[in-house]
Image (tube, rainbow, N blue to C red):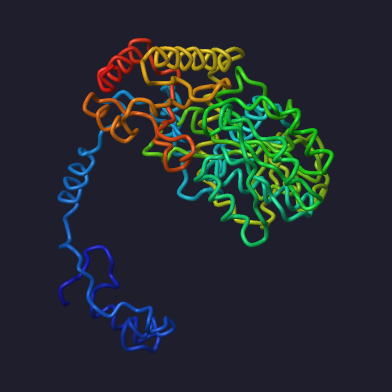
Amino acid sequence: MSNKVHPYIPNMVPEIQQEMLKEIGVNSVMELYDCIPSELQLKEDMNLPKALTEYELRRHIEEVLQKNTSTKEYLNFLGAGCWQHFIPAVCDEINQRSEFLTAYAGEPYEDHGRFQTLFEYQSLLAELVDMDVVNVPTFDWGQAAATSIRMAARITKRKKVLLAKTVAPERSKIIVNYGTPDLQFEFVDFHTDSGFINLEDLKTHLNEDVAAFYFENPSYLGFIESQGEEISKLLKTNGTLMVVGVDPISLGVLAPPSHYGADIVCGDLQPLGMHMNYSGGQAGFIATRDEIEYVQEYPSRLFGVIPTIKEGEYGFGDVAYERTSFALREKGKESVGTQTALWGITAGVYLSLMGPNGMYEVGQAIMQNSQYAAGQLNQLEGIKGSHLKSSFFKEFIVDFNETGLTVEEINQKLLHHKIFGGKDLSVEFPELGQCALYCVTEVHTKNDIDRFVQVLKEIIGK
């Protein structure tokens, strides 16, 4: 036998490969690619490095990883969609359970109580957002928001969607990408002093073609939108659905969107027991009322307690399961491509650990810490601890316009003191000038905040 090219793949042995090609009637592997246009085929050899042994590869990866600097070594005030929260040890234990961890997002080939745990997760989250129906996790908040809006468009049979300009820019891009070319998008202005949605501008955009208006509360910019009921009234007079994105960890201290008129609620599960994982610990959720026109539009799996399930009750083949739950099969309206159900199970475990008062306590701790941080920053000359006059939850805009330094310069100086500063907003929101989005959660101590304020005081030299 000739030399093997690869020790584990038999068909890479030249003689065996030639036999296989002969069997199917071709002379070379390249003949299998005749269907690919010539202009798309790579003609030259690829400049690849030499192959590594498994041991060499392990050493190489470890050396690369050692270049990273994590929040274990540095004090972190960066959020903007990936937040540092406390993760109970049991959540990590669940993440390693082979019964729940699957190679594919949706369907394992066996079940060890996985459906039951997803039912428990959806029940807990439904209670938190005070809605009736919750789906299995989507890939992230952006996908959850985009899918919610597509659902709203199908329900109303309209093609225009309004987005608040304060929606996270990356999320807006995902939403527009999902909706194009079927839907048309317009943006609604906000008040730069408070961040609140400009209701007059909203009125000018509303017409009989508008399917939904999407905004976030707390906002990407941190402030708490207090006009929910007014917005709801405007939308309902126009037959437009209200879709609200929410940070679920805020709901221990803030009213859920369903209380001020939201028709569809979505958000990110990452704060509920998931590590940041280099921004990979993301998973989204969608919640609605238990009404036929909403339930029919979910493209993802649902679980719930129904004593008697009538075949075809929801129009697409209900499936009874373990006498306690049912699953609605995917409708194929759009591809959801969910993250593994493990994230939903993790969030359910986190919520179950919090008990009857836990969400209130963690929310209260976050608000107290963030308010203290903003107050201390306000005492520094040339800095506004909160650029907006509105209330905020865990994120807030710090204004550095009067310091004579850019946010980029300040963040670089903070790194020398092992501190991750806030996100530079000068590109996404140039109208704010040199401002940064800072995040303070329950993991920050008074000493952490005091240390940061003292370092910042030294940096600005005042």
Residue 188 rendering spot, x and y as whole percentages: 65, 42
**198, above or below 388, in the image:** below
Q: Residue at x 73, y 43 (%)?
A: 320
Q: Residue at x 71, y 29 (%)?
A: 228
For residue 109, say whether it is visible. no
Judged from this view, the residue extending furthest toward the top is: 446
**20, above or below 453, in the image:** below
What is the quadrant of the N terminus in the image? bottom left
**14, above or below 273, in the image:** below
Residue 205 rendering spot, x and y as whole percentages: 73, 46
Q: Residue at x 78, y 44 (%)?
A: 240
The answer to which quarter of the image holds residue 64 is top left
What is the quadrant of the C terminus in the image? top left
Q: Nearer the viewer, residue 410 or 225?
A: 410
Residue 448 rendering spot, x and y as whole percentages: 33, 15
Q: Is residue 296 left or right of residue 416?
A: right
For residue 98, say whether it is visible. yes
Q: Is residue 11 left or right of residue 309?
A: left
The answer to which quarter of the image holds residue 359 is top right
Residue 453 rendering spot, x and y as whole percentages: 33, 16
The tally of labels here is 0
Q: Nearer the viewer, residue 150 or 190?
A: 190
